[in-house]
Amino acid sequence: MKPPILKKQETADVLSKKGACIEFFSAYQEMDIDRMLQLFSEDAQVYFEPLGADFSGPVRETGKALWSLLMETFPDLDNTVQSLTWNATDRTVTCRVSIFGTQAKPFVGIPSRGLRFDSEHIFIFRFKEDTTMDEVRVLWDHDRFVEQLHGTL
């Protein structure tokens, strides 16, 4: 007789933190910047890592500005969450997310050709002791993103 396979269940705290991440992406889908920002502490920081230091700073300024620009430029912007992974050591949830949309306006020097992008992103949300996020790091293949919008991919 085989022994039963037991899966370790996640705690309510971990599920709440993952739920906050899902809420962020739900608000992103609905293009509700205020709802996205409400999930972060007042002093939370964002790092759009492929873009460098100029695109890092307070979520309520830098994050709001870039997410608003994306929503304006890609009016059908959408996302699909692929996976969420909790790391207890650094209190983070790593989210693998597909983000996609069709360019309708020029975007940071890229003229609009009406082309669509589909890009895998990694969002790493760090949490305080509760379900408040105090940092998010966003990573993606920026060269591939640009190539899709230029039509060279």
Image (spheres, rainbow, N blue to C red):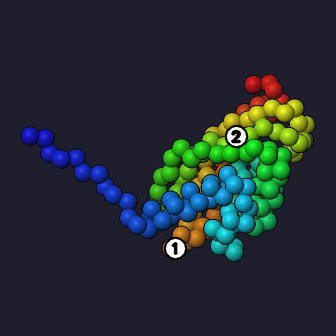
User: Mark 1: few, some, or many residues within 10 Å (few <14, many ≥20)?
Assistant: few
Tell me: 118 left or right of 108: left
Indicate whether 44 appears above or below 116. Answer: below
Most foreground residue, 92 or 69: 69
Q: Residue at x 62, y 55 (%)?
A: 26
Which mark, residue 8? Answer: none
Q: Residue at x 69, y 73 (%)?
A: 43
Q: Quadrant of the C terminus?
A: top right
User: Mark 2: few, some, or many residues within 10 Å (few <14, many ≥20)?
Assistant: some
Instruction: Identify the residue position indicated by label 1 in the image.
Output: 130
Mark 1: amino acid: Asp
Residue 107 in the image: state x and y as whole percent: 86, 44
Residue 24 in the image: state x and y as whole percent: 62, 59
Tell me: 103 left or right of 142: right
Which mark, residue 100? Answer: 2
Choose the circle earlier in sequence order: 1 or 2: 2
Indicate whether 27 appears above or below 107. Answer: below
Most foreground residue, 138 or 65: 65
Instruction: Pick out the residue farthest to the top.
Output: 152
Circle 2 SS class: strand
Tell me: 81 left or right of 142: left
Q: Quadrant of the N terminus?
A: top left
Q: Is residue 53 visible?
A: no
